[in-house]
Image (cartoon, helix red, strand yellow):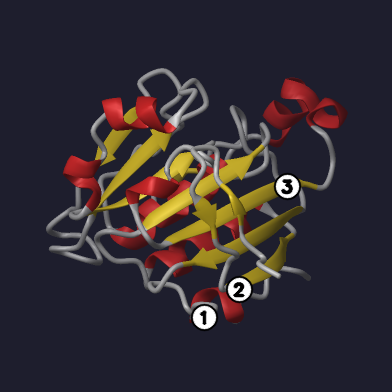
């Protein structure tokens, strides 16, 4: 009996090679996971990021940017669809990949993803696609899927409560708690697909966010 399913475009969807569930008790821990994971990322890697408002998508991606050594200012690309953050020659990974940050929420299909021509930057960058499930799987035979889930619904905090918590700065990068990511526990589920991710990478396997 096959364990594969069908993608939105009718292609067989193979199961992940592995799945790992983590708990981060603060937004800083979510940021740290991004920094650490960036250390094993290479040009051509594709990450598919999912999570509701305040789940930690922005903070996690800011961590990736810091670890990759790209230009600061990582924010949600909601209104521009794609933001490119170039590698800094004086950063921690000179000559490393750029970060391409995509918000696919308003894109209804894989065909619309193709219209923004990610294939031109895929081989030279680490590409992070928010809301990319069933839209970007055709871009690469390997990917990391990262789902972030809030422990408490957004309504329990609301914009006022998030603002009351303010924002923090880590290595000069403002963590975007006010506009998206609130400082609360969240569950992070990671899955690896394809030959690039045969086993849980070390930064994920050794992550100790839960206190």
Q: Does 23 sit left or right of 166 as displayed?
A: right
- Real-space CA distance between mark 2 and mark 3, rounded to the nearest whole angstrom: 19 Å
Q: Quadrant of the N terminus?
A: bottom right
User: Looking at the picture, how far across and down is residue 16, in whole percent?
Assistant: 58, 66
User: Looking at the picture, how far across and down is residue 134, in whole percent?
Assistant: 53, 40
Q: Does 95 sit left or right of 40 as displayed?
A: left
Which residue is more in the foreground, 36 or 174?
36
Examine the image and state in which quarter residue 51 appears. Answer: top right
Where is 135 relative to 107, above or below? below
Answer whether labels 2 and 3 touch (C-beta < 8 Å): no
Label 1: few (<14), some (14–19) or many (≥20) C-alpha neighbours in 10 Å:
some
- Real-space CA distance between mark 2 and mark 1, rounded to the nearest whole angstrom: 6 Å
Q: Does 110 sit left or right of 5 as displayed?
A: left
- Real-space CA distance between mark 1 and mark 3, rounded to the nearest whole angstrom: 23 Å
Q: Does 185 sit left or right of 56 as displayed?
A: right
Answer whether labels 2 and 1 touch (C-beta < 8 Å): yes
> Looking at the image, is mark 2 or mark 1 earlier in the sequence?
2
Q: Which residue is mark 3?
A: 149
- Checking the image for residue 199, the label placed there is 1
- Checking the image for residue 18, the label placed there is 2
Q: Is residue 49 at least partly visible in the picture?
A: yes
Label 2: few (<14), some (14–19) or many (≥20) C-alpha neighbours in 10 Å:
few
Examine the image and state in which quarter residue 207 appears. Answer: bottom right
Answer whether labels 1 and 3 touch (C-beta < 8 Å): no
> Looking at the image, is mark 2 or mark 3 earlier in the sequence?
2
Determine whether the residue tagged by mark 1 lies in a helix, strand or loop.
loop
Determine whether the residue tagged by mark 2 lies in a helix, strand or loop.
strand
């Amino acid at each position: 009996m096959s364990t594969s399913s069908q993608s939105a475009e009718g292609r067989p969807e193979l199961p992940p090679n592995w799945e790992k569930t983590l708990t981060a008790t603060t937004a800083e821990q979510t940021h740290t996971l991004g920094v650490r994971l960036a250390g094993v990322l290479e040009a051509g890697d594709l990450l598919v990021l999912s999570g509701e408002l305040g789940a930690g998508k922005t903070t996690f991606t800011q961590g990736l940017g810091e670890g990759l050594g790209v230009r600061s200012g990582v924010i949600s690309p909601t209104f521009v669809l794609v933001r490119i953050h170039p590698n800094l020659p004086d950063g921690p990974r000179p000559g490393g990949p750029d970060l391409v940050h995509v918000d696919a929420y308003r894109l209804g299909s894989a065909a619309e993803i193709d219209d923004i021509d990610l294939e031109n930057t895929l081989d030279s960058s680490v590409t992070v696609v928010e809301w990319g499930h069933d839209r970007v799987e055709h871009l690469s035979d390997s990917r990391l899927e990262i789902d972030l889930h809030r422990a408490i619904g957004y309504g329990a905090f609301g914009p006022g409560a998030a603002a009351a918590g303010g924002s923090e700065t880590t290595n000069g990068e403002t963590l975007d708690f006010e506009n998206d990511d609130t400082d609360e526990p969240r569950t992070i589920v990671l899955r690896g697909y394809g030959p690039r991710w045969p086993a849980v990478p070390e930064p994920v396997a050794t992550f100790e966010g839960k206190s």
